[in-house]
Image (spheres, rainbow, N blue to C red):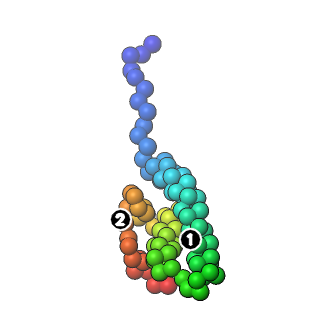
Amino acid sequence: MSDETFERPAITGIGRRLVFMVFFMVVLGAVRFVFWAIVAFQFLSHLFTGGVNPNAVTSGARLAEYIYRIMLFLTYETEAMPFPFGERADRPSGRDR
C-alpha cells in the first residue's frame, strides 16, 4: 500500500458554474413566487382603489430586472453573476431593449 493520500480536486470551471446555476435556479423559484404575489397585489389594488401602488410598481420592476439577470446567467448570455455574488443593480442594465 502506498502512503500517498488522495486529494479531491477543488471545484473549478464547469463544476463551479453548475453549483451556481443550481443555486440561482432555486433562487429563481422563490423570486418568481414573490413576483406573482406583487402581480396579484397590484391587480387587487387596481380593482379596489382604482389605482396602482407606486411602491409595488418599483418593487415589481426591480424584481423583474433581477429575474432577467438570473436568466441571462443561466442561459450563458453572461458570466456576471446576479446579486448576492455579483454587483447589485438598482437600475436596469445598459442593454438595449
C-alpha separation, residue under disc 2 versus residue under disc 1: 24 Å
54 or 27, which lies in front? 54
Q: Earlier in the sequence, mark 2 or mark 1?
A: 1
For residue 76, say whether it is visible. no
**Taking 5 as reference, is 60 left or right?**
right
Tag 2: Cα neighbours inside 10 Å, few (<14), some, or many (≥20)? few
Element type where label 2 sits in the image: loop
In the drawing, what numbered circle is on residue 87?
2
Q: Amino acid at mark 2?
A: Glu
Q: Going by the picture, which residue comes out furthest to the front?
A: 49
Residue 89's place in the image compared with 25, above or below, is: below
Q: Going by the picture, which residue comes out furthest to the left?
A: 87
Residue 45 location, x and y as percent? 58, 78
Residue 20 location, x and y as percent? 48, 53
45 or 79, which lies in front? 45
Q: Which residue is mark 1?
A: 38
**Taking 94 as reference, is 63 left or right?**
right
Q: Amino acid at mark 1?
A: Ile
